[in-house]
Image (cartoon, rainbow, N blue to C red):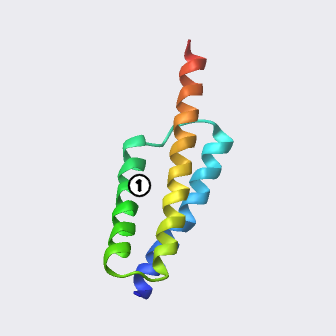
Amino acid sequence: MSIFEAFMLISFGIAWPVSIYKSIKSKSTKGKSFAFIMVILFGYACGITHKLLYSRDLVLILYFINFFMVAFDSILYVRNKKNEEANET
């Protein structure tokens, strides 16, 4: 296990609850990019795949936690986008 990989994932993991909180409170997609969120999800999926195929260790848990937080934020993005579009008409 790489301690640096773990610290990287912990650092990124600290940012996602803040993003989720902002999505819930603001009910807005302003300042967010769905494409960016999808790229991040793809990156975490690649990290998970690598860990499953080549080096299973405890860092895998951090990948899953981050993946699910980003996935939840993407669901909030879609919900907020639909609400914004409904309010425009």
Residue underneath mark 1: 41
Task: Tell me which residue sits at (57%, 67%) in the image.
Answer: 14
Q: Amino acid at mark 1?
A: Leu
Total number of numbered discs in the rendering: 1
Residue sticking out furthest to the front? 53
10 Å neighbourhood of mark 1: few (<14), some, or many (≥20)?
some
Image position of 87 with respect to 36: above or below: above
- Whole-percent x, y for residue 72 in the image: 56, 50
Q: Quadrant of residue 87?
A: top right
58 horizontally vs 2: left or right? right
Task: Tell me which residue sits at (47%, 43%) in the image.
Answer: 32
Task: Tell me which residue sits at (56%, 11%) in the image.
Answer: 89
- Whole-percent x, y for residue 70 in the image: 50, 54
- Whole-percent x, y for residue 84 in the image: 57, 25
Image position of 74 with respect to 46: above or below: above
Image position of 72 with respect to 53: above or below: above
In depth, the one of 49 and 14 nearer the eye is: 49
Q: Secondary structure at mark 1?
A: helix
Task: Tell me which residue sits at (41%, 84%) in the image.
Answer: 4
Residue sticking out furthest to the top? 89
- Whole-percent x, y for residue 53 in the image: 32, 74
Q: Quadrant of residue 33?
A: top left
The N terminus sits in image quarter: bottom left
